Amino acid sequence: MAAGREATPGDVAATERLMNYWAHGEGAAKIQWGAPGDFDRCVLELGEHVSPGIVKGLCSNLHMRATGARPGHAPAEEAAHRATRGGGDRGGN
């Protein structure tokens, strides 16, 4: 899709295929969503294909799509974070 040009149905379908590939398909297997370091793996993988100015936002959106939460807030990530802190919440963020 080019800047200043309206998206066609084909553009929308192609974008959706790519989002599904990275969130749920073979791309998701490379990133291992929900495992520690998933966001950094996404930035590394997708950084080869998209501009530096959008890769982190794209990876945040893909993380949300794949795990249901923003980076660092997926259930498995929060459980891992609690485990490294030595247990339950101690009043911090």
Image (cartoon, rainbow, N blue to C red):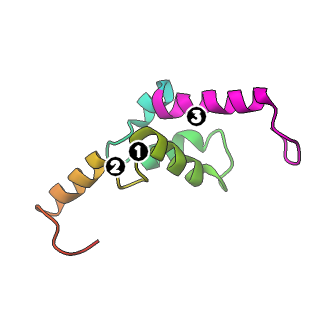
Q: Is residue 11 magenta?
A: yes
Residue 74: mark in rendering: 2
> Closer to us: mark 1 or mark 3?
1
Secondary element at image label 3: helix
Residue 43 in picture, x, y percent from top left: 53, 47
Residue 68: mark in rendering: 1
Secondary element at image label 2: loop
Give, as a single range, the part of the protein colored magenta: 1-24
Quarter of the image that includes the N terminus: top right
Residue type, label 1: Gly
Residue 87 in picture, x, y percent from top left: 11, 61
Disc 1 crowd rating (10 Å Cα; few below 14, some 14-19, many 20+) is: some
Disc 2 crowd rating (10 Å Cα; few below 14, some 14-19, many 20+) is: some
Q: Are marks 2 and 1 in contact (CB under 8 Å)?
A: yes
Residue at 24% over, 74% down: 92
Q: Are marks 2 and 3 in contact (CB under 8 Å)?
A: no
Which residue is farthest front? 9
N-term-proximal mark, 2 vs 1? 1
Distance between mark 1 and mark 3 Cα atoms: 14 Å
Distance between mark 2 and mark 1 Cα atoms: 7 Å
Left or right position of 22 against 82:
right
Residue at 22% over, 51% down: 80
